Structure formats: structure tokens, C-alpha cells
Image: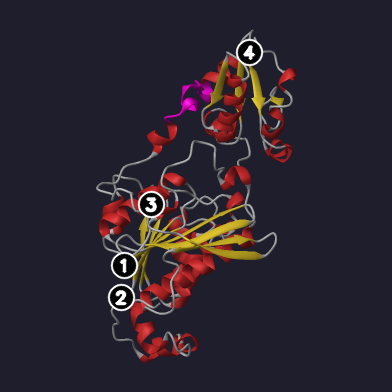
């Protein structure tokens, strides 16, 4: 069932009509819908794999104001899926690169760069002046913050996520339907859901999910069609199959009264008791006469890109069956790309009776930043 348009129309000139003529021919859009799109203010959280196609399609649709939230810079490993950026943009802020791409498609758009990490301290202020939030973030903590701030502000959120060859899309809107907390009431334990930086992602799946997200945003703004509010699309690109499930409002869920970062909640598990070792400290230890065993639990392809000399390699998925290759009395430091998989490995060791286990804080990326700047990043 269609809802009231989210945005009022504004006058549009003949040039705008000519530019978007093919879109105006769509009966559900028309001149009135284009006038609403021109007046719309959309905040896009994340300029990565999902934010890229969303940004391009919203720009192409004639959205009047687009806000971009991202603190990261473009790296070569982004480019296979983050199509708003190019090799020319490597090293630039993602917001700056995305802004240039948006304006190249819609020079009349207003593009606001918010080069910060969205968190509990700034979410409400960042989101307050926008009509609609599009959540293309790549981590659970940000999704909860977006959802909670939007609930306080009573603003709709178009949500998407992608990993490997699977994706999800929905619309959340407190007071009108469910929020992200109705879909995932409690944060899972650290490592339970791998990030795409660890698990991988196929680029075209980002485009598939992102295009649905952009479509949902346009439908909400114009008040046409049936939105995904209360429903979740599950995409399996490997089988090229989709299914839709209902997302009910949980009757016993307490309403959000403030925005809080969930980092501490996520870390308050048994895994947080495992000591962390900084890269500079590990470097000193490896150069000592009694160095620890550095256990690299990444995949072989990752080790082809970058490896810390002298490390022992056992992939995480093989670790439980290869524990007999390790000395239980030895000091072991687990290591992966960013610290997530290695924390899981450390827990496996501790559960198996290893007593001298620590985890490299920040993984090999932190090692590249703090110890060996010549190391390739990915």
C-alpha cells in the first residue's frame, strides 16, 4: 500500500523536465514526483560497496541534496565493488570522490560531505536535517546507531547489507513499522558475523542490493508503490534467487530513548579477556631471543599480498583440527587482517587449554601502519 509522499514538491524548470524526461514518463513518478525528488534531502551513510551505486542512482534520479557520511579514504582494494571511485581517486577521502562523481551526473545537486565516523555522539545531529537515511554501512555498530537515532527522529531508514554473494534490503521506520532492532534485537558476539573485509564480497551483488535501496528511497520520497517497510528481501546471487520475509514489530521491545554506541556491549564477552598486543610491542618481542609463535590464520591468498616474516600459517577454518601442530606451553600471538578472525582463533586456543595466548591488535593492517609502511594493504 502506498504511503503519503515523504517530501513536498518544489517548482522545476523546463531544463529539469528535459533532463529527466525519460523518468517523468514513468506514470508513478511524473512531474510531481520529479519535483519531490528535487526537494529531497537524503543522507547516505557509507560511500563504499553499497553507498556507491546508491549515490550514483540517487544523483541520476535528480535528488536535490545528498549528504555523505564516511571517514575513510579510497584504496585499490575498494575498486572492484565501490564503483563511485576510480584509481584516480586512490588516497582521496571517499566523500570527496563520491561528491565529484555525483556532481558529474547532477551538477545542480547539493552535496554535503560529513567526513566523520557516525556514532552515538553525532548521529542525531547529522541525521536531523535530512528527510531520509540510507544505511550502506558495513558494520553492526553503525547500523544500531543509525536505527536508534532514526527512531528518536522518527525518520525512515533504507537498509542494505551484503556479504560474499548474499544481500539484504529492507525499510525501517519507527512509529510506522519495525526498526533494525526488531530484525536483530541484540548484537551478536564479536566475530559471529564476519565483515566483508574478512569474508569477501562479489562486486555486482553490491550493485544488485544498492539499486534496490535506491529504488526504495525514490518510492518513499514520491509516495508510490509498496515499500519494503515490514519486509526483508533476502538475495542469494549464487542461485540467483530472492525471497521476502516479514519483519514484525516486536511487542515487548522497549522504545529507544537515547543513542548509545554498542562497541562495549559487543566486546563484553569472554573473548574480551584475551590480551591484545600492539604491533610495535610484537615487533620488539619477535626480535628478542625468546620470540612468541606468531600464528597467521588468514587465507593463503592473503599471505600472497602481505605476510609478517616468520609467522606460522594455519587458516582459521583448519585450526580446530590442527591444534596438535602447536605447543600448548608456547606463547602464541594470533594474527589476521584486522583482528576479528584472529580473536576467534585465540578463543579456540584458550578453549583447548592453551594458556599463553594473545591477539595482534588491529591485525596486519595495523602492522603495516605502525611497523612496516612498505607492506601492501588490501
Q: Residue at x 29, y 46 (%)?
A: 259
Which quadrant, please, contains the N terminus? Answer: bottom left
Please report whichever mark, 1 or 3, sits nearer to the chain's N-terminal start: 3
Please report whichever mark, 3 or 4, sits nearer to the chain's N-terminal start: 3
Question: Does 172 sit left or right of 10 as displayed?
Answer: right
Residues marked 1 and 3 touching at CB (< 8 Å): no
Q: Which residue is labeled 4 in the image?
A: 291
Which quadrant, please, contains the C terminus? Answer: top right
Residue extending farthest front: 251
Residue 218: in magenta span: no
Scheme of colours in the image = secondary structure
Q: Residue at x 47, y 90 (%)?
A: 25
Q: Which residue is labeled 2 in the image?
A: 7
Distance from the alpha carbon under mark 3 to that under mark 2 = 26 Å
* Figure quadrant of residue 129: bottom left
Please report whichever mark, 1 or 4, sits nearer to the chain's N-terminal start: 1
- Magenta stretch: give its range: 268-280
Distance from the alpha carbon under mark 1 to that under mark 4 = 56 Å
Distance from the alpha carbon under mark 4 to that under mark 2 = 63 Å
Q: Nearer the viewer, residue 345 or 107?
A: 345
The mark found on residue 131 in the picture is: 1
The mark found on residue 115 in the picture is: 3
Is 280 placed above or below 203 here?
A: above
Amino acid at each position: 500500500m502506498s504511503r503519503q509522499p515523504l517530501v513536498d514538491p518544489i517548482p522545476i524548470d523546463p531544463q529539469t523536465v528535459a533532463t529527466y524526461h525519460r523518468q517523468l514518463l514513468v506514470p508513478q513518478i511524473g512531474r510531481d514526483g520529479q519535483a519531490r525528488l528535487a526537494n529531497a534531502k537524503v543522507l547516505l551513510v557509507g560511500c563504499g560497496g553499497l553507498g556507491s551505486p546508491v549515490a550514483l542512482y540517487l544523483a541520476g534520479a535528480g535528488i536535490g541534496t545528498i549528504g555523505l557520511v564516511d571517514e575513510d579514504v579510497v584504496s585499490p582494494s575498494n575498486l572492484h565493488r565501490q564503483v563511485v571511485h576510480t584509481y584516480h581517486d586512490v588516497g582521496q577521502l571517499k566523500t570527496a570522490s563520491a561528491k565529484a562523481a555525483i556532481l558529474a551526473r547532477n551538477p545542480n545537486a547539493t552535496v554535503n560531505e560529513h567526513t566523520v565516523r557516525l556514532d552515538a555522539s553525532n548521529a542525531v545531529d547529522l541525521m536531523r536535517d535530512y528527510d531520509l537515511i540510507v544505511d550502506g554501512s558495513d558494520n553492526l555498530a553503525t547500523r544500531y546507531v543509525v536505527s536508534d537515532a532514526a527512531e528518536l527522529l522518527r525518520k525512515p531508514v533504507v537498509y542494505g547489507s551484503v556479504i560474499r554473494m548474499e544481500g539484504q534490503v529492507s525499510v525501517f521506520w519507527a512509529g510506522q513499522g519495525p526498526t533494525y532492532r526488531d530484525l536483530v534485537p541484540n548484537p551478536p558476539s564479536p566475530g559471529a558475523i564476519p565483515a566483508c573485509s574478512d569474508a569477501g564480497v562479489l562486486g555486482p551483488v553490491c550493485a544488485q542490493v544498492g539499486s534496490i535501496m535506491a529504488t526504495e528511497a525514490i518510492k518513499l520520497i514520491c509516495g508510490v508503490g509498496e515499500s519494503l517497510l515490514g519486509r526483508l528481501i533476502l538475495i542469494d546471487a549464487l542461485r540467483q534467487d530472492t525471497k521476502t520475509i516479514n519483519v514484525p514489530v516486536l511487542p515487548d521491545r522497549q522504545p529507544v530513548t537515547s543513542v548509545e554506541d554498542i562497541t562495549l556491549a559487543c566486546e563484553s564477552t569472554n573473548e574480551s579477556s584475551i590480551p591484545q598486543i600492539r604491533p610495535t610491542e610484537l615487533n620488539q618481542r619477535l626480535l628478542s631471543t625468546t620470540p612468541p609463535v606468531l600464528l597467521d590464520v588468514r587465507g593463503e591468498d592473503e599471505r600472497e599480498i602481505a605476510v609478517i616474516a616468520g609467522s606460522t600459517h594455519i587458516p582459521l577454518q583448519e585450526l580446530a583440527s590442527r591444534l596438535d601442530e602447536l605447543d600448548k606451553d608456547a606463547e602464541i600471538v594470533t594474527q589476521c587482517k584486522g583482528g576479528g578472525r584472529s580473536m576467534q582463533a585465540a578463543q579456540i586456543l584458550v578453549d583447548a587449554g592453551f594458556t599463553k595466548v594473545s591477539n595482534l591488535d588491529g591485525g596486519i593492517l595495523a602492522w603495516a601502519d605502525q611497523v612496516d609502511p612498505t607492506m601492501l594493504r588490501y
